[in-house]
Amino acid sequence: MLKQRDLLQAMNDECKSISVEMVSQNQAVKVKVNASGAMLGLWLSSQAQRMPADELAKLIVETAQAALRVSLERQQFLSAEFNKRFQELRHQPLTKWDGSTFTPDPS
């Protein structure tokens, strides 16, 4: 049970710590988002400052969305890894207070 709890805590901590930086194709915009897609940072190059406002706004949104997609991919990877390891732990013998072991039903 402790290993399962520790695994769950590690996965939770890892997911919370996800942040992704993404640079637009033309290098004008760089954004940083967290695991939930909240923007943590925005950097504009001198090229961005010369862009029309509508074009720049669209580029910022597209770059942030691309960063969010990468963040979600990382979360999906972590979730799959967690599920795999959790299933492995479910089948390991548990140690009782008296030192004897108990093997859970594999179903």
Image (cartoon, rainbow, N blue to C red):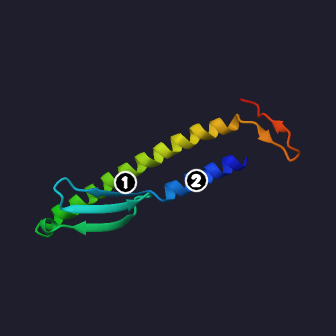
- Pointer 1 residue: 68
Q: Compare marks 2 and 1 and give the one earlier in the sequence.
A: 2
- Does 18 sit left or right of 27 as displayed? right
For the point 63% across and 36% down, which residue is it? 87
> What's the distance in space between the residues labelled 2 and 1, CA to CA?
21 Å
Numbered mark located on residue 39 in the image: none
Amino acid type of the residue tagged 1 in the rendering: Leu
Residue at the right extreme, as displayed = 98
Position of the C terminus by quadrant? top right
Quarter of the view holding residue 93: top right
Position in image of residue 9 (x %, y %) = 61, 54
Q: Nearer the viewer, residue 81 or 67?
A: 81
For the point 47% across and 44% down, which residue is it? 76
Q: Nearer the viewer, residue 65 or 85?
A: 85
Position in image of residue 57 (x %, y %) = 22, 64
- Does 13 sit left or right of 99 as displayed? left
Position in image of residue 91 (x %, y %) = 70, 34
For the point 47% across and 43% down, which residue is it? 77
- Pointer 2 residue: 10
Please tell me how crowded label 2 is: few (under 14), some (14-19), or many (20+) other residues with Cα within 10 Å.
few
Amino acid type of the residue tagged 2 in the rendering: Ala
Q: Marks 2 and 1: which is nearer the front? A: 2
Of helix, strand and loop, which one carries label 1? Answer: helix
- Does 5 sit left or right of 104 as displayed? left
Q: Nearer the viewer, residue 72 or 1?
A: 1
Q: Nearer the viewer, residue 55 or 89?
A: 89
Position in image of residue 21 (x %, y %) = 32, 58
- Does 60 sit left or right of 102 as displayed? left
